[in-house]
Amino acid sequence: MTTLRFYQGLQTIGGTIIEIQTDTARCLFDFGLIYNPSLDARVLARPDAAVYDGLKTGAIAPIEGLFDADALCGLPLKPYGQTQPKPFVLISHMHIDHMGALGALAEGVEVYLSQDSLRLYRGLRKIKEAVPAYHRNTIGLPPMRWKTKGDLRFRMIPVDHDVPGASGLEIQTPDGRICYTGDLRLHGRGGEKSLAFADTVRNADVCITEGTTVSFIEDFDAVDPTMSLEGGRSEAQVEAEIQNAAKANGGMVFINLYRRNVERVLALKHALQAAGRRFVMQYGTAVLFRQFYPNEPVAVFAPSLGTHVLNNAETIARDTLREHPERFALDLPYEHLLEALDYDPAQSLYIHSDGVPLGAYDPGYQKLQDFLAREGIAYQAIGCGGHARPAHLKYILTRIAPKTLVPLHSLTPEKMSIPGSKQLLPEAGMLYALSGGRVIKM
């Protein structure tokens, strides 16, 4: 018998954890953290009690058989090794809400992800962004190659998202065929990958889908499915707009971007060069960039290096930027915002390109706006999200045409349905059976 259990991420954007179990295999995907603005960043983590603290605060889902006995510190969960079959984990992509809790897993838990995701994960380890710790037992899989564990088969299918290595999943069990979209879109540079994913998993018995952008519309039923890119920015338009903004500005240009989106880092590096500016990266951005583009010249902001060394990279001193701000653009994450004080505010431009803070739900967003307004620094938001627009998502799901549609990774999953598919809104922790391609609540 094949069973499904949905632990979290059902009515939140991210944090999805789903379990599929057969007679001889137990598979979980993904294993991330849910954003919680109530947690104060000034409260320091306890490295020697990260799993215990995460479970106690709800940051980590309390699931049997995943954690070392010592790490549980007496919490009433069966540790790794005391449940059968032994679990393994699949990761769709390297965003915190999908992989942020990997370091909590017992070392014996095998984690499978795409080869590019593993490459990025190793870069995150170098800059200490693999929270709460780095999980060593990770296996990178080539795209489209089947892997068998017990009586379950799965493969990673590339999709387009705003991070390299993003994949959807196809999972075959003795009782039916399941697909999981992960996070995907059509308006990136690789939108054809998301369409190919839809064709590959067409007519799946169960399609588990993200629904991020549906959270912010009234009526998904009224949306016309389309693959047209009109009506919103594409990655190519982001590049062109930032190039034009940088060319029109006479002083320093600051760019707040998400460093894991290394494809955009490369595109902006070239766009800024065309605008007559050198893009100066923070150390962490440069390390991740080098994981994928080792032969690209890199300029690194000297104060960000600290005691680190980045071979074959040019370091740019703070004084150099101050003397000739019109020749540069500075990678400026939110935590380094005070660097903006060194330049003429009337000549400066701050470009928010999908970096942190992501939006108004983050208390830091208003603080950022207040700071820039107080200092008189011009602000432009030039970005495009990593999630499919409602019309694109509906097109993808209609193209898949599953028997059962399970929407989650959304604030309002109940809005999501498509003709010809049964909608299932699972309850957290409830057990469901897959039998003859149909999902039945147990």
Image (cartoon, rainbow, N blue to C red):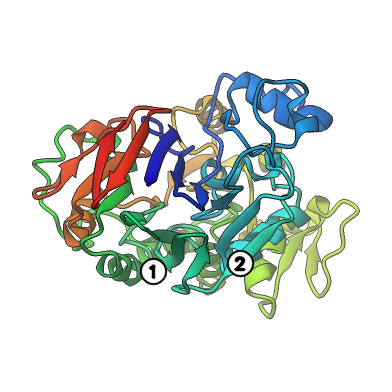
> Residue 439, how many percent across, how many down?
26, 42
Residue 231, visible in the rendered structure: yes
Amino acid type assigned to the residue bearing label 1 in the image:
Arg
Measuring from the top left, give residue 116's x and y in whole percent. 58, 68
Q: CA distance from mark 1 to mark 2?
A: 23 Å
Relative placement, left or right, of 5 versus 423 is right
Q: Residue at x 22, y 60 (%)?
A: 400
Residue at (80, 64) in percent of width and height:
315
Considering the numbered disc 2 on the image, is that residue within a helix, a strand or a loop?
strand
Q: Position of residue 139 (x, y in %)?
A: 64, 64
Provide the residue designation for mark 2: 140
Are there few (<14), some (14-19), or many (20+) residues within 10 Å of tag 1? some
Q: Which residue is mark 1?
A: 189
- Describe the element under mark 1 as helix, strand or loop: loop
Please tell me in which quadrant of the rendered image residue 293 appears.
bottom right
Disc on the earlier residue, 1 or 2:
2
Inspect this view and state whether residue 277 appears. Answer: no
* Foreground disc of the pair 1, 2: 2
